Amino acid sequence: MSKGVGTVETQFLTFGSTSEPFVTADGGELPSVTIAFETYGTLNADRSNAILLFHALSGAQHAAGINKSVPGTDDRWTEEMHTGWWDSFIGHGRALNTDKFFVICANYLGSCYGSTGPASIDPATGKPYGAKFPRVSVHDIVRSQLPVLEKFGIEKLHAVVGASLGGMCALDFVFHYPERVTNVIPIATGLRSHGLQQMHNLEQIIAITRDPDFLGGDYYGTPGPVHGLALARMISHKTFFYADAIEERAKIAIVQPEADIPWYRISSVLESYMLYQGQKFVKRFDANSYLRIIDAWQQFDLFKDAKSSGAHPLFSRCQHQQYLVFTIDSDCCFYPDYQSEICAELKKAEVPHLRLTVHSEKGHDSFLLEPKLYTPHLAYALAH
């Protein structure tokens, strides 16, 4: 019988200095960086059983177990965050079996759950970074997690796993550090930011930045752009589920949002449900962090990285790795064609890989909601 990991705590690692700042791809400098992370299981003697797990855009380091409080998150650590976002996948006898593996999940640079981000205090001013926080790229996020691996003396990972934006991080990791990974499991993701994603993301960026309460990003100490952030979440939520699944979820959800649309009366459970999703998200996430991470997604393009580094074909340095690529047939956020592109590049580079299509009515969020569809395949891939 499978069993969860129980109560856990977030850990913190701080690195960097004024003389040796963390420099982002865009040229920004952070004199000190703190990365919040959690671990599950035990690292073996030769440090060969570690799995690095990357979360999705608005996720956190808390992937498994129960964690009711994280220092430095203010009131954003809501009840919704207390149970790990992949809790049903991690633990004794589960897909990421903690009897065998040491699992690490870190909060992204630029996020708001304990890692350094726009809401963090700028040591130069004693105030939140706000608009001064530099742009970050997916590769910046990946690089910022290397010191966590160094802390444990991990030179080579048994696997990297990630879904959605986390899958992009996983692919970035194996592209830039191929010698440090054996198994690669990207789930519902892509090699680059695609056109439809860029349009949806731009809508969200505009929704936040044109909220009058955004104040150019320096809104700390005020309510902030709650309407813009809620609207951004509603825009993104449309891509998380297959349309029919959203309607079905709306029918069973008990939601009573505080609607403040002056001239319009909410007339359906679907409208009520979407408003609720936006209002709920505002309570747990920071608008500046959302903008920084979504910007990293917008910039992501491994083909450009390959061109600049002379890597041809794209995965030419990854022939020793094993890939399990997951597709969700009803995914409207990372369409199946995006994983076809991944597999075409792996084939071109003669990298061993297997592609599995999950047949689900739950759309992109299937990877969060349906462990039975993934667990046997994840367990098999990680056993090798």
Image (cartoon, helix red, strand yellow):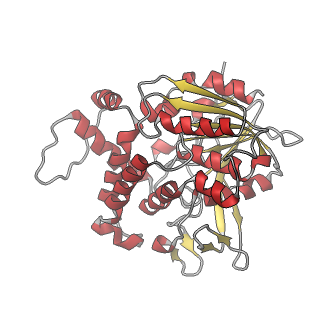
Q: Residue at left 49%, top 33%?
A: 336
Q: Residue at left 35%, top 65%?
A: 209
x then y, percent, for residue 175: 69, 49
Q: Quadrant of residue 158?
A: top right
- Against 194, residue 184 (above or below) is above
In this view of the protein, which residue sits in the foreground, 208 or 321? 321
Task: State the residue lying farthest toward the left.
Answer: 263
x then y, percent, for residue 232: 35, 52
Q: Quadrant of residue 51?
A: top right
In this view of the protein, which residue sits in the foreground, 249 or 201? 201
- Against 167, residue 30 (above or below) is below
Q: Is residue 159 left or right of residue 262?
A: right
Q: Tell me, yes or no, if residue 65 can be seen here.
A: no
Q: Tell me, yes or no, if residue 43 can be seen here.
A: yes
x then y, percent, for residue 42: 78, 39
The quadrant of the picture occupied by the N terminus is top right
- Against 244, residue 13 (above or below) is below
x then y, percent, for residue 147: 74, 58
The quadrant of the picture occupied by the C terminus is top right
Q: Quadrant of residue 255?
A: top left
Q: Is residue 293 left or right of residue 157?
A: left
In this view of the protein, which residue sits in the foreground, 202 or 82? 202
Q: How many numbered callouts?
A: 0
- Against 6, residue 231 (above or below) is below
Task: State the residue lying farthest toward the top.
Answer: 1
Q: Residue at left 39%, top 34%?
A: 241
Q: Is residue 72 left or right of residue 224?
A: right
